[in-house]
Image (spheres, rainbow, N blue to C red):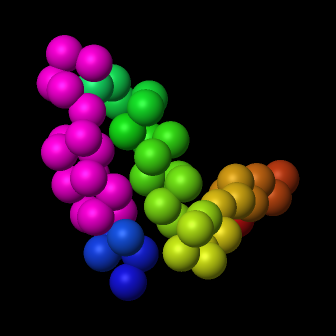
């Protein structure tokens, strides 16, 4: 389901932002906004334990 939200964010971004003003950073921010507004949680990955697991 998250993939559908991400795909929608990308499509909207491509439609609304002129190519000469589009940046990967701005696209990532838009994707994050779409995910958060769709009740997805964005959190950093858990750090590995000292034994590497």
- The residue sitting at the right extreme is 50
Quadrant of the snapshot with the N terminus: bottom left
- The residue sitting at the bottom extreme is 1
In the displayed structure image, the side of residue 2 where residue 13 appears, left or right: left
Q: Residue at x 54, y 54 (%)?
A: 33
Q: Residue at x 30, y 75 (%)?
A: 4
Span of residues in magenta: 6-21
Q: Determine whether 17 is above or below 21 in the image.
A: below
All told, the count of numbered labels is: 0
Quadrant of the snapshot with the C terminus: bottom right
In the displayed structure image, the side of residue 46 where residue 14 appears, left or right: left
How far from the left and from the top, in percent, is residue 48? Answer: 74, 56
Q: Is residue 45 magenta?
A: no
- The residue sitting at the top extreme is 20
Q: Quadrant of residue 42?
A: bottom right
Regarding residue 48, the answer to whether it shows in the image is no
């Amino acid at each position: 389901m998250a993939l559908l939200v991400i795909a929608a964010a990308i499509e909207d971004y491509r439609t609304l932002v002129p190519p000469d003003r589009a940046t990967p950073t701005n696209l990532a921010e838009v994707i994050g906004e779409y995910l958060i507004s769709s009740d997805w949680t964005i959190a950093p990955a858990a750090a590995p334990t000292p034994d590497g697991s």
